Image (tube, rainbow, N blue to C red):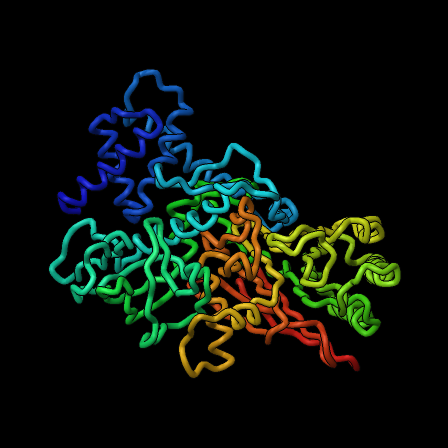
Amino acid sequence: MNGAQTQGNRALILKAFSKYGLKTIRPDALTFLEELIDEYDIDEDAIPASMELLAKNYLLQEDQTGFVSKAVLSKVYEAMQDQGEKEFDQFDPETDVDNHLFFVDAFEMPWWQYSLERQTFEKSAAKPTISGSPENRARMYRDRLQIIRRIILRNEHFAPAAFQSRDRLAPLKLRSTKDLLGRGGDDEQFMLFGMLAYSPDGKLCLEDLDGRVEMDMTNVEPSEGLYTEGCMVMVEGIYTDEEILVVHAIGHPPCEKRKRAREIDGHFDFLGKGATTLLEDSSWAARMKDFEHVTFVVISDLWLDEPRILGAVRQLLEKCIAMAWIPKVFILCGSFTSKAVQGSGKDLQRYQDGFDDLANIISSYPDFRETHFVFVPGPLDLCGSTVFPRPPILPSFLGRLKAKVPKAHFMSNPCRIKVFAQEIVIFREDMMAKMLRNLITHKKGVSDADLKKYLFQTILDQCHLSPLPQNVQPILPEFDHAMRLYPLPTTLILADKYQRYEENYEGCHVFNPGSFLGSSFGFSSYFPHNVTTEASELMEDD
């Protein structure tokens, strides 16, 4: 490590400890911390979080000396190591999976906001409300923009190196709309980051925290992805005398892998189920091979008003028993009706009967008594709201299911499952159709395979499940955090009536189970032990 890098690391250490009132670190303690950074090859961006974790544990020692000593610091470090090893040792094949399986409703997730002043996340002291204040409607987009901006600035192409190298290209520089003032006609290239939006007079613009600039996209060839109003994008172009940015290139922001984001923000409990350390994550990952028997079945468009569908469900459960394969979780996504419920007594009774019939089928097979059944509402289901996140199906229709299926979970849309160190996001919406209907631009000559890739690539690059404007897809402003995909989940289930697929993108496994319809009833099986999916079909004559 050279001198400049050492000085940089020391500054990060001192800043992290000062944040917790530990302003004086003895030289031998400082050296000890620098050696830890070297030993574990901690990335520069991950140093603050690592040092803050040590500082928080140091405070638990109630050291009254007023300075950080190596002796106490060593004890803290050893205790943290012992705790990690203890947690690892306790994790064995006999572990009850249910103790590490959590179902996370969107309306129960902690409300983490991004603080511009502190440049970090802060947990809101206020509870989010359905109505949402005007201030938080604006904050929703500001938080989205700032979260992605942080990702861009720590990307290798934008982040300045800790020490300079002759071979390294100068980092790219993001500019703001305020930098354009007085620069029209200079033929200077500007790279900006902001949100695609339309001005009141219908002109396409880019908006950031400092303002708005009109764009001319006539000659631009976009990079991969789908581009709609509401997307956060990077553009490069020349600012003219007419105060228009003539765009030469447009692209989605770079995607950041889950591990990288967890190194920096892993100490935040975004799900409300307890934050886990990277050491714990590694421990779980190393032992997941012992849990090959833990599987999830994912079904979408389970039309319970269709006798053929109910017959296929019964057939599927019987095949599971015959194969001695009892899934740990069935994820059942709507719509649970083939047609909209208009509100007549007949329609409501038909909707009720579907759930009652399903309850009778499931409860008739005792083998599934310990299986969890997760219900996620779809576009036609009765939830009391069409705004995202959508609440669970109205409880008045679920009495028999609750009584006969003790491990039934009626969740919001979207919702999440945490199993060991994995985070699985489930979202039921026909996003492909919505995105295509609202396109501003996209790469020309794309195939169906390209469209599938562009959809999940766009959603993950945007760190958001629905990067569409409020007039197209309304979102509750004070629950927008439940729509975020930061850090990236381990697995993203995009249940959509579009064609099924399974892909991996930047370490995130993405799949669409397709619809449980037609002559072959399609569904997917998910295997947490190796983060893979298997597409399956159940033929009517099986």
* Direction from residue 166 to residue 434 in the image, left or right: right
Q: Residue at x 22, y 64 (%)?
A: 241
Res. 36 visible in picture: yes
Extreme left residue here? 166
Picture layout, residue 227 above or below residue 57: below
Name the spot of residue 157 as percent of width and height, x first: 26, 60
Rendered image quadrant of residue 495: bottom right
Name the spot of residue 255 as percent of width and height, x first: 39, 60
Front residue of 393/236: it is 236
How many numbered marks appear? 0
Q: Residue at x 36, y 41 (%)?
A: 116
Name the spot of residue 371 as percent of width and height, x first: 73, 55
Res. 358 visible in picture: no
Q: Residue at x 88, y 62 (%)?
A: 346
Name the spot of residue 103 as percent of width and height, x first: 63, 49
Rendered image quadrant of residue 325: bottom right
* Direction from residue 220 to residue 182 in the image, left or right: left
Front residue of 131/364: it is 131
Rendered image quadrant of residue 15: top left
Quadrant (top left, top right, bottom left, bottom right) of the C terminus: bottom right
Q: Residue at x 50, y 52 (%)?
A: 484
* Direction from residue 223 to residue 356 in the image, left or right: right
Extreme top residue here? 64
Picture layout, residue 393 above or below residue 502: above
